Structure formats: C-alpha cells, structure tokens
Image (cartoon, rainbow, N blue to C red):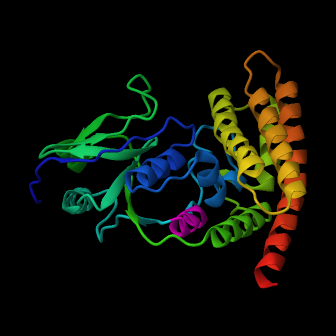
Amino acid sequence: MNLTTELHFDLEQPNWNSTYMSAIAGAAEYFGLKYSAPVLFVESGYYAAINIQHDLKPCGPYCWNHRPIAKNIESMGLSVNWLHSPFDCNSSDHRKHLLDQICALGKDSVLCMVGLEFQLLSRRDAQKLFFAMPWGPSVPTCVPELSFADLVAGKHFPGTAWFTISLTSVSPRSTRLQNSLDCAAVFSKQPEQPKDSEYYFGPNAWEQWIAKLESGSYDKHGHWWSCMVWGEARRQAGEYFAKEWTNSADLGEDLSRKFKEASGHVFRAARKEISDPERADFIRKAKEIETQISESLESCRSYSNTRQFN
C-alpha cells in the first residue's frame, strides 16, 4: 500500500435531499461547470426517476440503477467511473486494492464514497479520509472521516463503494435535453422488476407506495424520506421548465405547473399529523399527475426531434 501525503479538494457538497445529485453538483462546481440545481436534476434525467422499497424503507431512493443518469451526466461534462478490484468484495484484499486506487488519485478526479449517503472526499492525509458533510455534523448517516486501518479492517458501515468523477467534454444543450427526454421515456415504461426484488421502479413504484400507505403497515421514516427525495426532484423539474425550457412556451408552462403540483402532493404526504388514507390520497394525486407529465414529456420529445431534423 502506498503512503500518501495530504491532498485537499476545495469543494462543497450542497445540502440537497438527494446526496447522489449533491455529490455530482459538488464535483461540477469543483471543475468549474456552472450548472443550476434545476439543470442538473433535469438534464441528468434524475427528475424522472422514482424507486420505492417494498415496505417503504429509506433505502428506496438509493438502491436503483443509476447508470442511465451517469450516462447523461457524462454528456454534461462529468465522467462517473466506479472503482473495482479482482478480489472478493468481502475480503481485506478487496479493501486494500480499493484503498491503493484511492491513494493514487490526484486532483484531476473527485472521489465519492457510497455508504449510507453519497459523500465527496474533501481531504486525505497519510492515515485518514475526510468527507464533505452536506447536512452538517449532527446527521449520523454522514460520516466525517474514515481511517485507512478501519477501511481495510472492514470496521465501517456495510456496502461501502466508491466512484470517481472526472472532467470530460460537454455536449451541446440540445443533445443533453434530448438525452434527458429519452431517459424519461424509458423510466415511464420501466418493465417489471425481478420477482425476488425488494424494489419497485417507475409506475409500479407509485402503485406500491399507495398500497403500503393504505395498508397502514410500512416504514414511517422511509415514507417521509421518499417524499423528501422524490418531491425534491419534481420541484426542481418544475423550476427547470419554468425558467430553462426555451422551445414551446406552452409545453414549458404546462410541465412546470404539473411538476410543481406533483411535488406539492408528495411533500404534503410527508406531513406527520395526517392519516395514512390521507397520505395515500396525496400520493395517488401525484401519480395521476405523473401520468400526465409522461404524456407531456413525450410531446416535448417529439417536438425536440422535429426541431432537430428539420
């Protein structure tokens, strides 16, 4: 294992509910890419995602295939690459190999730890890794530091993985938007998950969310957290189509209104003082609007394709 001298990254990770997106935002700012939050959420495709765990546990917003999002992020100028090793993922050899890769990185790549949250590496010295704290020091799901010794020994939370974010070429905005709309179309027609999966993605996620709320048997914190993450994504989309959409004004205004309505219903479903049937009703209203949004986004997609080839 290589010893390393201290390396400091001048970066910040914003306090968004989605720490995946806030990690991408922190890396974008570090590399001098000036994207607003609405642009990042929409042009990455994240705004169109929804994933729910069977019992509404808080892992729902984290445990899904982010590859389509990473592909779109690459067109925005940021290349996301996971660290791998040839060893068994539960072995110390695996962890040593990852640590060697971490210590070999310079300032041309930003590192993100995937633990209970997505956290950017802000500094490392010869013994420890130090991480950005998007929600401050009082939130226990974010860790301020991790020693090399504890990492190699496996004395940390389970499931730790790592990816790098590096600078690449930026595609024209028309390409980025088309990628985003294509991604939304795929997400709206997401096929059934494997039968042994704990998770529901896309339209099936809304159905499962409603069913669990109606049953009264679900993870209360996980429901609240799902509202925070997926409500945030749709609120940012509402801002994007109000301020950033430059094609058909009618389409932009329509989508902005619908996204804001959907996010409003999702956030209202998070209120602790309301009943489970009321929560289910708010999520049902959001689902109905989401169906309308999918149709409007398809119109945007057709409009953009027509503009591109005429």
- Tell me if 227 is positioned left or right of 32 in this view: right
Q: Where residue 290 sits in the image (x, y, percent)?
A: 84, 50
Is residue 181 among the parts visible in the rendering? yes
- Tell me if 31 is positioned left or right of 45 in this view: left
The secondary structure that dominates the magenta segment is: helix
Rendered image quadrant of residue 173: bottom right
Q: Is residue 96 above or below residue 126?
A: below
Residue appearing at x 77%, y 66% in the figure: 185
Q: Where residue 167 sits in the image (x, y, percent)?
A: 40, 65
Quadrant of the image containing the C terminus: bottom right
Residue appearing at x 85%, y 73% in the figure: 302
In the displayed orientation, state which residue is furthest to the top: 273
Is residue 301 a member of the stretch shown in magenta?
no
Q: Is residue 145 above or below residue 291?
A: above
Quadrant of the image containing the N terminus: bottom left
Find the magenta span and give its range: 67-76
Is residue 71 a member of the stretch shown in magenta?
yes
Residue appearing at x 72%, y 44% in the figure: 239
